[in-house]
Amino acid sequence: MEAPLLPAEEAPAPVSEDFSWLDEPAAPVKEPEADFSWLEEPAEEAGPAATQDAEDALIENDGGALPPSQPVVLEPEPEPSARESDEFAWLDAPLEPEPEEAGAADPLADAPDRLDMGQTPLEGVPGLAPVPAPPAADSEGWRVRTAPEAIATPAAVTQTTWFQRLREGLSRSSGQLSGQITSLFTKRRLDEDTLQDFEDVLIQADLGVETATRITSRLSEGRFGREISGDEVRSILSDEVEKTLSPVAIPLELDLSVKPHVILVVGVNGTGKTTTIGKLAAKLHRGGLKVTLAAGDTFRAAAVEQLKIWGERTNSPVVAKAIGADAAGLAFEAYDEAVANGSDVLIIDTAGRLQNKAELMAELEKIVRVLKKRVPDAPHTVLQTLDATTGQNALQQVEIFRNVAGVNGLVMTKLDGTARGGILVAIAARHKLPVFFIGVGEGIDDLEPFRARDFADAIAGRAA
Ligand SMILES: Nc1nc2c(ncn2[C@@H]2O[C@H](COP(=O)(O)OP(=O)(O)OP(=O)(O)O)[C@@H](O)[C@H]2O)c(=O)[nH]1
């Protein structure tokens, strides 16, 4: 049952020195009904001011969970005094230097070298062999960073199946756009009005002003006053979209010279972090890698439970603690656990609540700081999930999280069944961050590598 609560600052904050309750199983938390309707409102193209407005709106609305006009109903939060008392404050102290015992073993030395490319277990898995750099994404969307001499021939790609799946997923985006192209260009000579209408259609399709302008000026080149077919328009649209997307269609690269490769997954809640982690763990597990998962969204019991289920499904150990536990402390312990169990990859889930941006920033920063105590360049990958159905708001979400958490790769989820897939083009044009994967469904196999050509064709409604 949803219980209206006082805003956090008005809630009584019992002072207690006994933190043993942290180890008690928490009462299940009921989430408020998500209402994303406010996200459908068109956002302005972001300049710094627009970004600030959007940021404020996102913070106010917890990234979309609550519409602004409704009374605030917050889920029960851990006692502020307990969270702030910070069982893991000791993590901020400089680490004691490790005693250098004669012959002391490097904890990483015992980790199985699963990526000896001479006899790699990846070899038997279709599409998982590494490809020369800088390549298009592997068929699975990730690869091991490796020396050029170890490069093997990429396995055959199941192009048709993949393209059909993408086309299906993006059919609402492309169907709308394609229909508008047909009605705009049928039996009509290309003139200023048509070009303007076409530019509006592209902007409405979330492609972004920059890309829309480029496409219309390319279309007008040498075609003014002529009749132009819908197919010709779709072909130009696809080519221009591909030009924008190609530089960001990069596979996730795992440098396993130091194991585990640490992937921190961030993003507004509901954007698909936990589901993407599960799908990614399945992908890596299929490729012969050992993965450990860390349930760093310590706000929500449901998120922890969800991750545990993904852990079972993908044979990945899950490091979890009681609700309200310190997320950075959990990440620290998960890292040690991943080293101890010989994992190749550690994937850390995080909370995505923007209601209290300062707290979220502090939490993410602390996770990063704590991981660096173990390995200076960890987290090696900071992956942000974006929900395609949020349209223009996704642009501002990237702005926020790349500043807070140093995002260096994106996954766009829920591209199945949205008419707003074009937002990925605007994000690529603006942020130029690698897009490793796209989510095209809730199933374990619904995480696809991002391929610029296929995506561009699918968006433009062009035949393969
Ligand atoms: N259709 C579709 N649904 C998805 C996709 N990815 C995730 N979802 C669904 O989106 C919902 C939210 O996903 P989560 O993985 O819980 O999102 P989260 O970011 O971890 O959310 P919190 O745990 O609240 O922080 C779930 O119902 C998922 O099944 C996708 O690619 N397509």
Image (tube, rainbow, N blue to C red):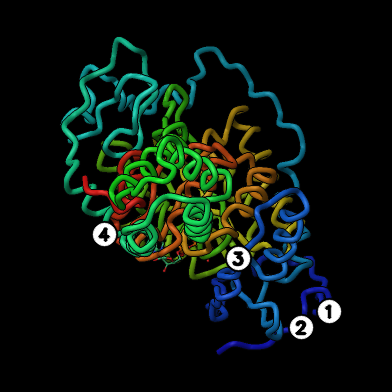
Q: Earlier in the sequence, mark 4 or mark 3?
A: 3
- Which of the two discs, 4 and 2, labels the residue nearer the N terminus? 2
Q: Position of residue 169 (x, y in %)?
A: 31, 59
Quadrant position of the N terminus in the picture: bottom right
Answer left or right for 346 relative to 60: left
Residue at 48% x, 59% y is: 201
Residue beneath label 1, please? 10
| Mark closest to the chain's N terminus, 4 or 1 | 1
Q: Residue furthest front?
A: 225
Q: Hey, what amino acid is under mark 3?
A: Pro
Q: Position of residue 79 (x, y in %)?
A: 73, 71
Horizontal side of residue 377 vs 107, given as left or right: right
* 276 vs 48, nearest the viewer: 48
Do labels 2 and 1 touch, CB within 8 Å? yes
Q: CA distance from mark 4 to mark 2?
A: 45 Å
Question: Relative to 445, is 318 on the left or the right?
Answer: right
- Residue that numbered label 4 is attached to: 168
Give whichever of 160, 252 is nearer the camera. 160
Mark 3 lies on residue: 42
Q: CA distance from mark 4 to mark 1?
A: 49 Å
